[in-house]
């Protein structure tokens, strides 16, 4: 273990916990990072003067900023907890999850990214209105807001559970602090602050997780010896890329892998994925942003699974000693706590926290945009309220951000007070059955024009029937789904996914037979939507002057501040290999930051 025994530590007070120590210095690192993130929000509020700036960065985001933000918002702390648990148990199978994400990003690069940006809207329900009509638009708007609040609360609650059990933090304190930090920079800086903090979080997370993976491989004796260790521990069968249906209850098989890859691909290439590209300058920049996201996701899929696998070889007793429902989910943290030098442990906690914060802040900003752009106008027209100025509308957006943020925190605290055994897993299952049905028409609607206005709603209804059957565990014997005995029926993941996706897709395709004539008003609206989506953007004509150099300079300066902060960690007593790890992290962040500042002083941006 790299930690110096002379460093002051805070002992755990939990029973049945392994003897892992958290240095006081780590708390200073965490507090310093959170303060920096709040400062980012204060600085970037100057970039927002209207709702267009606040909700989509005025469509002036550069490819590297939008791409890194898309990457960071594509995963949460589940990557270092739930996914780590899968890697601990089944090895390389977890790569299919992030492989599906990467495949989705690469499809965005080929054609979908420009399509999504060229819709020229602020919220995806606006695009839904152009494709399916106002009724479908308001269904999605009203459906999305409570669902996003609920899942943001669940993500925050899940993060609190993990930090409480593994690092010994008070769960309520984690929820309150993280929630308030996200609120402070999201409400003040809007979309600009979200993208900037996502970039800085990625600037720390990517090299830091590479260092963790490198230390794990070094401890195992290199990549070649990794496979020897797997064989020596008798894990060759369990760590196969595709597992037999006889182990893990049928999970991690070809069926599971194909369902996971398909689901992730659909999520990344449907209309509700569009907000990740609304902030980028044009279609060409969207392609670059998607390519960056895909490359980073591929890199992540290769390095994020190594620490939990190493924990299975090196620290199985420590992992299994954790008193949580699935101890394997602590495997990434165990490897980090054992191998990282003093100071960087605080940053790995930050990385895990940042993964949730980056998805939460994006969801919060998107949700408020839906309320302001899709729901508020309808209410305003109904009550015949007076039209308000753009600046006042942006202030309403900031106020709603605070209100929604507090709702998320309060809801998370409520979950934390319950016994809540299995609630997180239950919500994940319900989410899979409720979110996929509304995604299906948003995928097919981008490729099939000949449909009636109600095609999306009919598709959702068909898919929800299957979701209900799966959720209430109703067997379908002639399809071989579920059990016919008195025992509880359980659809496996691939049955749930392909059942919902298949029936929802058939419902959408069935509606084609009822499509109105090509000369109808609805078909004309649909044709106009497709023409708009496929027409390249002329940035100078449609948006105006960019602020690329300002983005480079501001974020580069924050990057240098992080570099200086990391360099201070060299003053902490650590073994030589620990100091080398700290120095490598500082140099990596520093080089990227200096290149950004240098580019900002030139006449052309990167």
Image: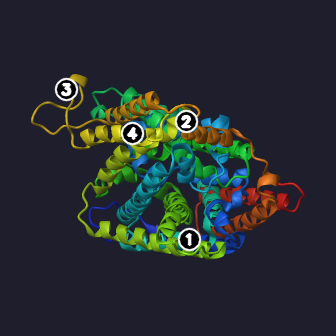
Residue beneath disc 1: 397
Mark 3: give few (<14), some (14-19) or many (20+) Cα within 10 Å. Answer: few
Q: Where on the picture, by quarter, is residue 41? A: bottom right
Q: What's the CA distance linking mark 1 and mark 2?
A: 51 Å
Residue placed at 11% from the left, 32% from the top? 485
Nearest the eye: 160 or 570: 160
Q: CA distance from mark 4 to mark 1?
A: 33 Å
Q: Is residue 439 above or below residue 325?
A: above
Q: Position of residue 248 (x, y in %)?
A: 30, 35
In the picture of the structure, the residue carrying the numbered disc 3 is 477
Say which mark, if any, is on residue 531: none
Q: Is residue 105 left or right of residue 516?
A: right
In front: label 3 or label 1 = 1
Can residue 65 be seen in the rendering of this structure? yes
Q: Nearer the viewer, residue 262 or 102?
A: 262
Tell me the element at label 3: helix
Q: Residue furthest left?
A: 486
Which of the two residues, 340 or 445, is positioned nearer the viewer here?
445
């Amino acid at each position: 273990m790299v930690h110096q025994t002379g460093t002051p530590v805070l002992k755990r007070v939990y029973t049945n916990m392994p003897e892992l120590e958290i240095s006081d210095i780590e708390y200073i690192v965490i507090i310093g990072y959170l303060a920096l993130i709040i400062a980012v929000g204060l600085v970037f509020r100057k970039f927002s003067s209207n709702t267009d700036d606040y909700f989509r960065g005025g469509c002036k985001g550069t490819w590297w900023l939008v791409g890194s933000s898309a990457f960071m918002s594509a995963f949460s702390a589940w990557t270092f907890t739930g996914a780590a648990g899968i890697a601990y148990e089944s090895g390389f199978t977890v790569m299919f999850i992030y492989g599906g994400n990467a495949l989705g990003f690469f499809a965005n690069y080929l054609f979908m990214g420009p399509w999504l940006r060229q819709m020229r809207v602020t919220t995806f329900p606006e695009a839904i209105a152009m494709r399916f009509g106002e009724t479908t638009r308001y269904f999605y708007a009203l459906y999305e807001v409570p669902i996003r609040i609920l899942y943001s609360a669940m993500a925050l609650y899940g993060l609190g559970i993990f930090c409480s059990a593994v690092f010994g933090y008070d769960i309520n304190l984690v929820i309150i602090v993280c929630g308030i930090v996200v609120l402070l920079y999201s409400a003040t800086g809007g979309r600009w602050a979200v993208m900037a903090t996502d970039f800085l979080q990625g600037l720390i997370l990517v090299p830091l997780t590479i260092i963790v993976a490198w230390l794990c491989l070094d401890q195992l004796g290199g990549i070649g010896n990794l496979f020897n260790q797997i064989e020596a521990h008798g894990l060759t069968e369990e760590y196969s890329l595709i597992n037999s249906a006889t182990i893990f209850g049928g999970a991690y098989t070809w069926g599971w892998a194909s369902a996971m890859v398909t689901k992730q691909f659909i999520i990344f290439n449907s209309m509700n994925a569009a907000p990740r590209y609304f902030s980028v300058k044009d279609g060409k920049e969207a392609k670059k942003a998607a390519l960056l996201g895909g490359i980073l996701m591929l890199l992540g899929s290769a390095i994020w699974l190594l620490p939990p696998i190493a924990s299975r070889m090196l620290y199985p007793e420590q992992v299994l000693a954790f008193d949580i429902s699935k101890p394997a989910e602590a495997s990434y943290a165990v490897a980090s706590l054992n191998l990282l030098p003093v100071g960087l442990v605080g940053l790995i906690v930050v990385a895990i926290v940042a993964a949730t914060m980056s998805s939460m802040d994006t969801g919060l900003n998107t949700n408020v945009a839906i309320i302001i752009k899709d729901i508020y106008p309808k209410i305003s027209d109904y009550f015949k309220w007076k039209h308000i100025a753009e600046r006042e509308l942006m202030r309403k957006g900031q106020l709603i951000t605070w209100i929604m943020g507090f709702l998320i925190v309060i809801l998370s605290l409520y979950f934390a007070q319950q016994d809540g055994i299995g609630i997180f897993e239950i919500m994940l299952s319900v989410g899979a059955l409720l979110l996929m049905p509304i995604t299906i028409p948003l995928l097919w609607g981008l490729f099939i024009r000949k449909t009636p206005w109600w095609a999306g709603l009919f598709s959702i209804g068909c898919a929800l029937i299957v979701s209900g059957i799966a959720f209430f565990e109703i067997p379908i014997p002639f399809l071989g789904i579920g059990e016919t005995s008195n025992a509880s029926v359980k659809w496996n993941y691939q049955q749930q996914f392909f059942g919902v996706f298949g029936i929802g897709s058939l419902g959408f395709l069935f509606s084609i037979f009822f499509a109105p004539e090509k000369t109808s008003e609805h078909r004309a609206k649909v044709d106009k939507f497709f023409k708009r989506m496929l027409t390249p953007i002329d940035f100078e004509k449609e948006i105006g002057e960019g602020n690329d150099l300002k983005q480079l300079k501001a974020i580069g300066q924050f990057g240098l501040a992080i570099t200086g902060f990391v360099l201070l960690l060299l003053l902490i007593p650590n073994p030589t290999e620990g100091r080398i790890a700290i120095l490598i992290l500082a140099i990596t962040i520093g080089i990227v930051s200096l290149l950004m500042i240098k580019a900002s002083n030139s006449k052309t941006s990167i």
